[in-house]
Image: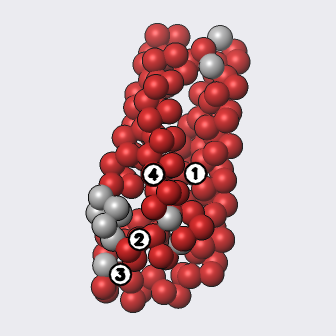
């Protein structure tokens, strides 16, 4: 991948991550109205926690244009995403037996809790890759 194409890919990845956080939180929490969303993981997705995920999304958007020159920030974002992957693994280990019933009652919520850690893992790897790439620039 040439320098220009690589920078464009990093830019678009940051944009995607930002909108994933913003729109994902709004959709899964139904614009902060779904109490079940917050109560299923109150330590991570309280109303405040959900808002802070959206703030991280804004940070990704703000950094997108210059991320290819900001390796330390890319690594901070990778670490932040890794923390969310960890919280998801802990949640899945403790609550995976509740997912079938949740799927029956609220498929969107079940989908979110079933997969948010996998999405965060993909973005953690992307941010780590972007950081390594930025170090090489």
> What mark, if any, has residue 37 been given in the picture?
2
Query: How many numbered markers are drawn?
Result: 4
Residue at 56% from the left image edge and 18% from the top image edge: 68
Q: Earlier in the sequence, mark 2 or mark 4?
A: 2
Residue at 67% from the left image edge and 23% from the top image edge: 71
Q: Position of residue 49 (x, y in %)?
A: 52, 57
> What mark, if any, has residue 6 been given in the picture?
none
Residue labelled with disc 4: 51
Q: Earlier in the sequence, mark 1 or mark 2?
A: 2
Residue labelled with disc 3: 103
Q: CA distance from mark 4 to mark 1?
A: 20 Å
Quadrant that contains the C terminus? top right
Q: Residues within 10 Å of mark 1 (few under 14, many from 20)?
A: some
- Helix, strand or loop at label 3? It is helix
Q: Nearer the viewer, mark 1 or mark 2?
A: 2
Residue at 45% from the left image edge and 82% from the top image edge: 99
- Helix, strand or loop at label 2? It is helix
Residue labelled with disc 1: 121
Q: Position of residue 7 (x, y in %)?
A: 49, 17
Q: Earlier in the sequence, mark 3 or mark 1?
A: 3
Q: CA distance from mark 3 to mark 4?
A: 25 Å
């Amino acid at each position: 991948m040439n320098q220009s194409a690589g920078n464009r890919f990093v830019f678009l990845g940051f944009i995607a991550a930002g909108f994933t956080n913003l729109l994902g939180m709004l959709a899964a929490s139904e614009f902060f109205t779904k109490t079940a969303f917050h109560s299923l993981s109150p330590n991570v997705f309280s109303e405040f926690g959900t808002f802070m995920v959206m703030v991280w999304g804004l940070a990704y958007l703000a950094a997108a244009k210059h991320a290819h020159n900001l390796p330390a920030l890319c690594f901070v974002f990778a670490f932040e995403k890794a923390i969310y992957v960890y919280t998801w693994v802990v949640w899945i280990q403790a609550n995976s037996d509740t997912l079938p019933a949740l799927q029956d009652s609220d498929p969107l919520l079940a989908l979110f809790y079933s997969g948010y850690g996998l999405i965060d893992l993909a973005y953690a790897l992307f941010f780590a890759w972007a950081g390594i790439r930025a170090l090489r620039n």
